[in-house]
Image (cartoon, rainbow, N blue to C red):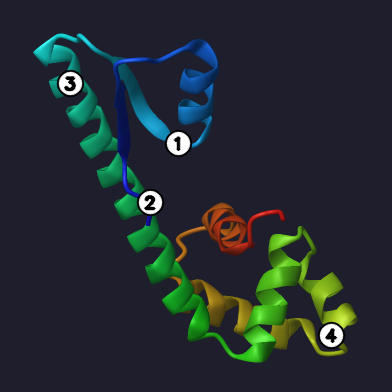
Amino acid sequence: MELPIIFITGYGDIPMTVKAMKSGAVEFLTKPFREQDLLDAIQQALDRDRVARRRQEDLACLRKRYGTLTAREREVMGLVTSGMLNKQVASELGTSEITVKMHRGQVMRKMQAGSLAELVRMAEKLKPPPA
């Protein structure tokens, strides 16, 4: 988890500001600054940190649920969320459509997904970020 940074300097220039902001600084304040500017920056940093922590907690919970799936259920989830129909998944896996429906139901239950669209969003969140 990254700490929110407020960059404060007495000798800031544009390249330094750009570098600090690209590196993740919430705010770049040059001295002298108003007390309210610092308070606003702190509030913004706390808000951003709260959102990031919540997102991390949600992802950890999602990964935990994904960890409860069997290997076959993971296969079915991957194929279903890629847009394949049950009969296409059955053909791909060499099984019956009924079996795919059973696995799909288990996936929906274990992942606590209320709809296929929600399951697709979950699958997207579970994908590793591009390198």
Disc 3 target residue: 38
Under circle 4, the secondary element is: helix
Judge by depth and name the residue closer to the eye, 123 or 114: 123
Judge by depth and name the residue closer to the eye, 79 or 102: 79
Whichever of callouts 3 and 4 sits on the residue coming sooner in the sequence is 3
Residue 109 seen by the camera: no
Disc 4 target residue: 93
Disc 1 target residue: 24
Using a 10 Å C-alpha cutoff, classify the residue at mark 1 as few (fewer than 14 neighbours), some (14 to 19) or many (20 or more). some
Q: Are marks 2 and 1 in contact (CB under 8 Å)?
A: yes
Whichever of callouts 3 and 1 sits on the residue coming sooner in the sequence is 1
Say whether residue 15 is left or right of residue 97: left
Three-letter residue code for mark 4: Leu
The C terminus: image quadrant: bottom right
Quote the CA–CA distance across marks 4 and 1: 45 Å
Name the front one of labels 3 and 4: 3
Three-letter residue code for mark 1: Gly
Quote the CA–CA distance across marks 3 and 1: 17 Å
Which residue: 48% across, 86% down? 68
Quote the CA–CA distance across marks 3 and 2: 20 Å
